[in-house]
Structure formats: C-alpha cells, structure tokens
Amino acid sequence: MSGLSEYLIGKRDAVLAQREQVAAGDVKPLAVSATVTAEGRTGVRRIRAREFQIISDSGPDLAGHNLGPTSPEIQLGVLGSCLTHTFLIQAAVLSVPLDSLDIDVTATFDPRAGEPGYEDVPVYPHDLRYTVRLSSPASDEKISELHQAVERTCPILNLLINPQPIHGSLERVPAP
C-alpha cells in the first residue's frame, strides 16, 4: 500500500475544504440511492448506484451461481469500506501518518434462523466484529485518538449501532 501517507495529504486538503463549505452553509444534505434488479434465468442481483454496478448472488445451496458475494457479505464489505474511509479521513484531519491500513469484518450468519427450533436465532448477520491492522509511526495515544474519532464518525458503523426505522412500500407493475 505504498503512497498512503502521500494520499493523506490530499485527503486532508479535501476534508478541510469540505468543512469550510459546511461552515459557510454551502453544503446541503445529499440524497443517495441504489437500485437492485433481479436478472432473469440466474436470479443474480445487479446493484446500481450512480454509474457503478455490483453483482450479488447466492451459492448453489440457494439455487445461485456463486457469481458474486451474498448480501450479508456485501454488508460486511460496506462496513469495512466505510471504516477504512473514515480511518483515512480522520488520519488526515488528525495528522496521523499511516503507512498501511486494512480492516477485516466478520459476523455470524445462520441460515437456520427462524426455522422450527431456531426461532430465536437472528435472521440477520450478528456478532459483528472488525479488526484494524495499520502501520504508523504515530504514538499509541495518537492511534487510540484516531480509533475513537473513527468510531464516533463512521456513518455505517453508527447506522448499525443506532438503527433507524426503514419504511418500505410495494408497487405492482405490469409484466415486461
């Protein structure tokens, strides 16, 4: 991961510029969205956000073709990505040099959840854990400050810790 320290210099400039815009009242809330379509014949889920696509699939045990990560795996990746990005932001803001950074996120997902005899097993990934591995010449105190700042400001971590209501609706459309 060469060049991470150099990257943090540009990251710091960008974050500080955005904070100036926020303070000046020039930044407004952003609407974010994604659309997911089930593909014919395979059931593969094509996730679209802006101009990007991610493929999600199941394993053969659920009639999938193993063409991409499952939804729970993507959720763990989303958490890991957000934690990583927030570490980079906070390292830049706090002037903590980083030589390398990677994060592993794990959870338990039990396909028996909700089935007879397993009614009390959560139907969602649980026992989430993350491990950060970083290399930095900064002191232990500075790294601890960095970690605390990340846990305070990581949007996806905080969403998972402090869930909010989700409102769903269903619309029937004619067959294509």
Image: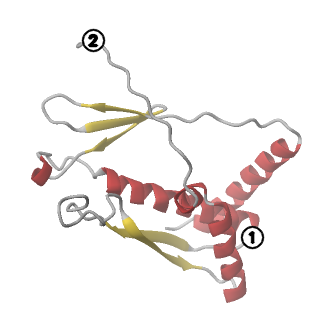
Q: Is residue 116 above or below residue 48?
A: below
Instruction: Please tell me in which quadrant of the rendered image residue 174 appears.
Output: top left
Structural crowding at the residue carrying mark 2, measured as other residues with C-alpha within 10 Å and reported as few (<14), some (14–19) or many (≥20):
few
Front in this rendered view, residue 96 or 175: 175
Are the residues tagged 1 and 2 within 8 Å (C-beta)? no
Q: Is residue 63 left or right of residue 78?
A: left
In primary-sequence order, the first of circles 1 and 2 is 1
Judged from the image, the secondary structure of the residue bearing numbered disc 2 is loop
Instruction: Please tell me in which quadrant of the rendered image residue 78 appears.
Output: bottom left
Which residue type carries mark 2?
Answer: Pro
Q: Identify the residue shown where x is 40% and y is 60%.
A: 76
Judged from the image, the secondary structure of the residue bearing numbered disc 1 is loop
Front in this rendered view, residue 156 or 11: 156
Total marks drawn? 2
Judged by depth in the image, the label closer to the viewer, 1 or 2, is 2
Q: Identify the residue shown where x is 56% and y is 36%.
A: 32
**Where's residue 129, x and y in %?**
44, 73
Q: Would you say residue 97 is visible in this rendering? A: no
Which residue type carries mark 1?
Answer: Ser
Q: Would you say residue 121 is visible in this rendering? A: yes
Q: Identify the residue shown where x is 36% and y is 62%.
A: 125
Instruction: Please tell me in which quadrant of the rendered image residue 86 appears.
Output: bottom right
Q: Is residue 42 left or right of residue 128?
A: left
Compute the Cα span from label 1 to label 2.
Answer: 56 Å
**Where's residue 33, x and y in %?**
51, 34
Q: Which residue is mark 2?
A: 174
Q: Which residue is mark 1?
A: 95
Q: Which label belongs to residue 77? A: none
Q: Quadrant of the C terminus?
A: top left
Q: Identify the residue shown where x is 35% and y is 58%.
A: 124
Front in this rendered view, residue 15 or 169: 169
Q: Is residue 36 left or right of residue 149?
A: left
